[in-house]
Image (tube, rainbow, N blue to C red):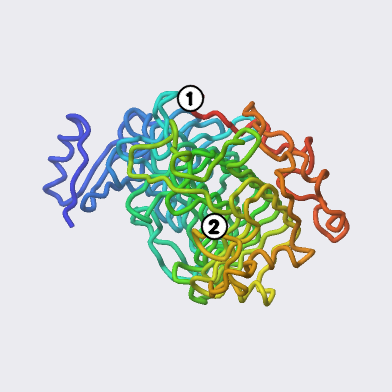
């Protein structure tokens, strides 16, 4: 491919003229790692893709050269500050980037900026409770919308069930390998706001995407707010995650695919009743793969201590799951996104074997969908192939349904053949007939978001002691259901933000 020189000022142009005759592609007399240097880093081109050992441009204020695809190959530690992320910035294999606590990264809207960690790349984003790292829209307060920029994508070398695969959303990056203990970095105390760009139909960049991320990677204390697709999605991998917040996302909150097998614990999800996706929004959406084939490694992730606050709460007593109610409101972006309906707290389908324990969901149209349209998920449920245990559903219109986008409780006896309308659905019977699986409440047991103050929560903080069945207090579990043990167990304090629309960055 043609190799070109990035020109920055007269000095660079003269230097370029000298070296072109000798076959070199770029030159500089200075250190150009992008760390504390006023000179622009040298850039070479592989086709339209820019490549550099430096990452800081425009006098150290921008991450990436401004090209749509920029590949960083160096080793840089940023200083705490505010940066504009431009284009798709790839952290290539062997490259290292360290982002300190308190740093603010604004995603460029025009280029749909995204930070993409490729397999073998390493990023440290070590925020703190007092000084989280914030990745957000570049728009002014009051003008921010879901999909203003791309998002954070982390890819590794752990196993998935489709081999080497291109990551969803459009970037060039592939993921997957045989190293389940692979280490892609450290990601702690991070907020990702107004991300998630729909590159094309069914090819969206999520708030945070994990592609075959290995268990050597550290993930904890993340908040994704107003994502224009899923808040979090895992494609294969073995990474373990703790303390996640999903706030008013567009599609699903926690989406698992392609053999993800990590453990995810202590998570809170809160929905906006006027934002739902055309594909039907869920708390969990879990597939083994898109076709439902029984291909190993299987999706066997375990979620523990999850609290789902659905669209029907004390703040939204007029909620109706209809197109005239779900309007997107002021958060509706002008980028091709389409509105739909809310569906379920948990949809497990396509041969997934997702496990969930000690968790709570309130205010969804449907509690549980064990979907047999593709694959054999109902079969695995009956045979004990995965575990649902100590789960509370409250304020659901329907406890269980067997089919995608079918809001009825009378479907089938086996979760697959929807033939007998007189029978209670398989998903309903599976949930209510197993005493260890869960408990239902007709009302929302006051576990609704009653105010949107700094914390935005009231009773969900107390669900652990107030509604926890006595049986789990002595069976080796942690002794409570949901994301919080009690009102004193506020692991969100100090670093989360439930009003990113009006925050001045």
Q: In which quarter of the image is residue 29?
A: top left
Residue at horizontal 40 percent and vertical 40 percent from the top:
147
- Nearer to us in this view, 33 or 69: 69
Mark 2 vs mark 1: give the one in front: 2
Image x and y of residue 63, in percent: 38, 37
Q: Residue under circle 1?
A: 505
Q: Quadrant of the N terminus?
A: bottom left
One can see residue 137 in this view: yes
Q: Residue under circle 2?
A: 407
- Placement of 155 over or under 52, stated as above or below: below
How far separated are the C-alphas under marks 2 and 1?
42 Å
The kind of secondary structure element at disc 1 is loop
- Nearer to us in this view, 487 or 14: 487
Residue at horizontal 12 percent and vertical 40 percent from the top:
17
Image x and y of residue 319, in percent: 56, 39
Q: In the image as oriented, which residue stretches furthest toward the front?
A: 422
The kind of secondary structure element at disc 2 is loop
Image x and y of residue 311, in percent: 58, 42
Report the side of 320 relative to 355 (left or right): left
Image x and y of residue 241, in percent: 62, 52
Number of other residues with Cα within 10 Å of mark 1, as a class: few under 14, some 14 to 19, many 20 or more: some
Report the side of 140 relative to 372 (left or right): left
- Placement of 497 over or under 364, stated as above or below: above
Q: In the rendered structure, which disc, 2 or 1, sits on the residue that comes first in sequence?
A: 2
Callouts 2 and 1 close, C-beta under 8 Å:
no
Residue at horizontal 23 percent and vertical 44 percent from the top:
26
One can see residue 180 in this view: no
Number of other residues with Cα within 10 Å of mark 2, as a class: few under 14, some 14 to 19, many 20 or more: some
């Amino acid at each position: 491919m043609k190799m070109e020189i990035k020109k920055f000022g007269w000095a660079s142009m003269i230097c370029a003229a000298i070296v072109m005759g000798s076959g070199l592609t770029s030159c500089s007399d200075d250190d150009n790692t992008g760390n504390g240097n006023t000179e622009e880093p040298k850039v070479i081109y592989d086709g339209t893709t820019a490549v550099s050992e430096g990452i800081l441009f425009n006098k150290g204020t921008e991450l990436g050269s401004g090209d749509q695809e920029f590949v960083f190959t160096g080793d840089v530690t940023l200083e705490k500050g505010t940066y504009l992320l431009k284009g798709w910035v790839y952290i290539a294999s062997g490259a290292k980037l360290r982002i300190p606590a308190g740093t603010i990264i604004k995603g460029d809207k025009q280029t749909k900026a995204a930070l993409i960690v490729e397999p073998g790349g390493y990023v440290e984003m070590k925020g703190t409770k007092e000084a989280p790292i914030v990745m957000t829209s570049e728009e002014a307060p009051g003008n921010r919308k879901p999909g203003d920029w791309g998002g954070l994508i982390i890819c590794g070398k752990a196993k998935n069930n489709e081999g080497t695969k291109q990551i969803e959303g459009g970037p060039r990056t592939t993921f997957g390998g045989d190293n389940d203990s692979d280490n892609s970095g450290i990601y702690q105390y991070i907020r990702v706001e107004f991300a998630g760009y729909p590159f094309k139909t069914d090819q969206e960049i999520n708030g945070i995407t994990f592609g075959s991320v290995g268990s050597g990677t550290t993930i904890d204390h993340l908040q994704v707010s107003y994502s224009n697709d899923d808040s979090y999605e895992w494609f294969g991998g073995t990474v373990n995650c703790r303390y996640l917040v999903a706030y008013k996302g567009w599609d699903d909150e926690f989406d698992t695919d392609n053999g993800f097998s990590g453990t995810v614990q202590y998570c809170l999800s809160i929905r906006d009743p006027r934002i739902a996706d055309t594909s039907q929004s869920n708390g969990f959406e879990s597939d083994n793969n898109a076709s439902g084939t029984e291909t190993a490694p299987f999706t066997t992730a375990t979620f523990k201590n999850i609290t789902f606050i659905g669209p029907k709460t004390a703040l939204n007593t007029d909620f109706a799951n209809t197109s005239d109610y779900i309007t997107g409101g002021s958060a509706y972006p002008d980028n091709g996104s389409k509105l739909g309906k809310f569906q379920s707290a948990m949809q497990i389908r396509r041969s997934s074997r997702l496990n969930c324990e000690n968790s709570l969901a309130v205010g969804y149209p449907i509690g549980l969908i064990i979907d047999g349209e593709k694959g054999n998920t109902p079969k695995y449920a009956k045979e004990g192939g995965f575990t649902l245990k100590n789960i509370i559903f409250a304020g659901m219109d329907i406890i269980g349904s067997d089919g995608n986008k079918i809001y009825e409780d009378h479907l089938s006896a086996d979760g697959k053949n929807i033939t007998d309308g007189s029978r209670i659905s398989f998903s309903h019977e599976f949930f209510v007939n197993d005493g260890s699986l869960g408990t239902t409440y007709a009302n929302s047991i006051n576990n609704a978001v009653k105010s949107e103050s700094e914390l935005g929560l009231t009773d969900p903080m107390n669900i652990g002691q107030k509604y926890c069945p006595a049986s789990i207090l002595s069976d080796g579990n942690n002794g409570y259901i949901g994301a919080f043990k009690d009102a004193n167990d506020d692991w969100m304090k100090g670093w989360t933000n439930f009003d990113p629309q009006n925050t001045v960055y």
